[in-house]
Image (cartoon, rainbow, N blue to C red):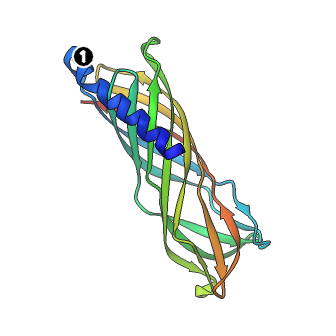
Amino acid sequence: MFKKSMLLAAVLAGLAAPAWAQTSGDSPWLVRLRAVHLNSANGDSTGLGLTINNKWLPEADVSYFFTPNIAAELILTYPQRQSVYAGGAYIGSLRHLPPTLTLQYHFTNSSPVTPYVGAGLNYTRFSSVDVLGGAADVKRNSFGPALQVGASYALTKNLSLNLDVKKVWIKTDVYAGGNKAGTFKVDPVLVGVGLGYRF
């Protein structure tokens, strides 16, 4: 139901895009670079007290504005290495690649500040899993919703300062000796600051 709603909203926004393009002098493309702090919820049902480290990471995103108010944003980074702990003791590491696509509404009546809200879908791919010398493993794919709130402050006609907060639902099953031991929920809050450029 969630996926169908997002698809319908994107189609309706797309139908409005040609009319807006004829009346607006702004380019529909916006790119941003952010420094983002990942704060994991560390929800663990295995009983081992599993956690991963919080960290700063680089993030790039590309937005396309269907109308002055409605945009789609693709959020990207490179595979991130996370240390894995059990009861506070280091037991290995893994990498995750978490691209996220959101549909946003921008409130354009408060210039030079433009607040926005967004909702979308995250896909996370886990790789390079090296936990307990290979005795433990995780499910490699995760799908989950994402929520977003942020604001941009116009520095020039094309350049803006951006503050962004996302909640992303990411979880994976944990296996030991080939048997499922439980579920680990990353479910991070991501707080980012960066610059955007409107072409």
Mark 1 lies on residue: 24
Depth order, front residue of 19/50: 19
- Left or right of 58, for residue 166: right
Coordinates of residue 132 in the picture (x, y in percent): 64, 83
Coordinates of residue 12 in the picture (x, y in percent): 37, 29
Above-or-below relation of 196 to 91: above
Q: Residue furthest left?
A: 22
Q: Residue at x 47, y 43 (%)?
A: 4
Amino acid type of the residue that numbered disc 1 sits on in the rendered structure: Ser
- Left or right of 61, for residue 163: right
Q: Residue at x 63, y 58 (%)?
A: 186
Mark 1 Cα-neighbour bin, 10 Å: few <14, some 14–19, many ≥20: few
Coordinates of residue 81 in the picture (x, y in percent): 51, 66
Q: How many marks?
A: 1
Q: Quadrant of the N terminus?
A: top right
Residue 195 in view of the camera: no
Above-or-below relation of 65 to 31: above
Above-or-below relation of 97 to 10: below
Depth order, front residue of 2/59: 2
- Left or right of 70, for residue 5: right
Secondary element type, mark 1: loop
Q: Residue furthest right?
A: 47
Residue 32 in view of the camera: yes
Residue 92's image quarter? bottom right
Q: Quadrant of the C terminus?
A: top left
Residue 68's image quarter? top left
Coordinates of residue 170 in the picture (x, y in percent): 59, 56
